[in-house]
Image (cartoon, rainbow, N blue to C red):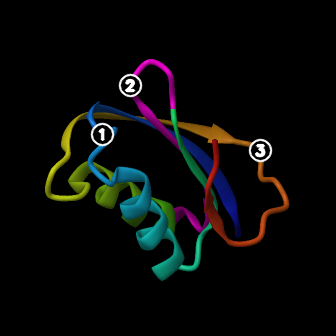
């Protein structure tokens, strides 16, 4: 069963390759969705997968790339959308 979740990652997550890290992890896991920077300094990600896959995905978000300093990850259930691939969006 596919579900969707939206994630909001705070800390030092912009300018450190975080979106590219998220995109690579999601593509390696064959998840669908997107990731983007927010004006308030957070990164938002939207992912579609099984509950187990999304639990694994959020663990990667907490780790991030080596230059990131993750201070928190909020997650919310979201409505599944028709998506192909995982992209960085503006």
Disc 1 versus disc 2: distance between alpha carbons?
Answer: 7 Å
| Residue 46 shows in the view | no
| Residue 57 shows in the view | yes
Q: Is residue 25 magenta?
A: no
| Mark linked to residue 79 | 3
Q: For this rendering, which residue is in front, 3 or 10?
A: 10
Q: Mark 1 or 2 closer to N-term?
A: 1
Magenta residues, start to end: 38-51
Q: Is residue 42 magenta?
A: yes
Q: Does the residue at mark 1 contact the one at mark 2 (Cβ under 8 Å)?
A: yes
Q: Quadrant of the N terminus?
A: bottom right
Q: Does the residue at mark 3 contact the one at mark 2 (Cβ under 8 Å)?
A: no
Q: Residue at x 69, y 41 (%)?
A: 78
Residue sitting at the far front: 15
Q: Mark 3 or 2 closer to N-term?
A: 2
Query: Residue 26: image x %, image y %?
Result: 50, 69
In the depicted structure, whether residue 24 falls above or below residue 74: below
Q: Quadrant of the C terminus?
A: top right
Query: Residue 29: image x %, image y %?
Result: 49, 78
Left or right of residue 55: residue 36: right
Disc 3 versus disc 2: distance between alpha carbons?
Answer: 24 Å
Q: Classify mark 2: helix, strand or loop.
A: loop
| Mark linked to residue 13 | 1
Q: For this rendering, which residue is in front, 36 or 3?
A: 36
Left or right of residue 4: residue 28: left
The residue that label 2 is drawn on is 41
């Amino acid at each position: 069963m596919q579900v969707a979740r939206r994630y909001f990652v705070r800390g030092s997550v912009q300018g450190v390759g975080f979106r590219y890290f998220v995109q690579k992890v999601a593509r390696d896991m064959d998840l669908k969705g997107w990731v983007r920077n927010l004006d308030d300094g957070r990164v938002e990600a939207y992912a579609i997968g099984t509950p187990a896959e999304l639990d694994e995905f959020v663990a990667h978000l907490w780790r991030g790339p080596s230059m990131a300093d993750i201070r928190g990850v909020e997650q919310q259930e979201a409505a599944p959308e028709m998506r192909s691939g995982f992209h960085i969006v503006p």
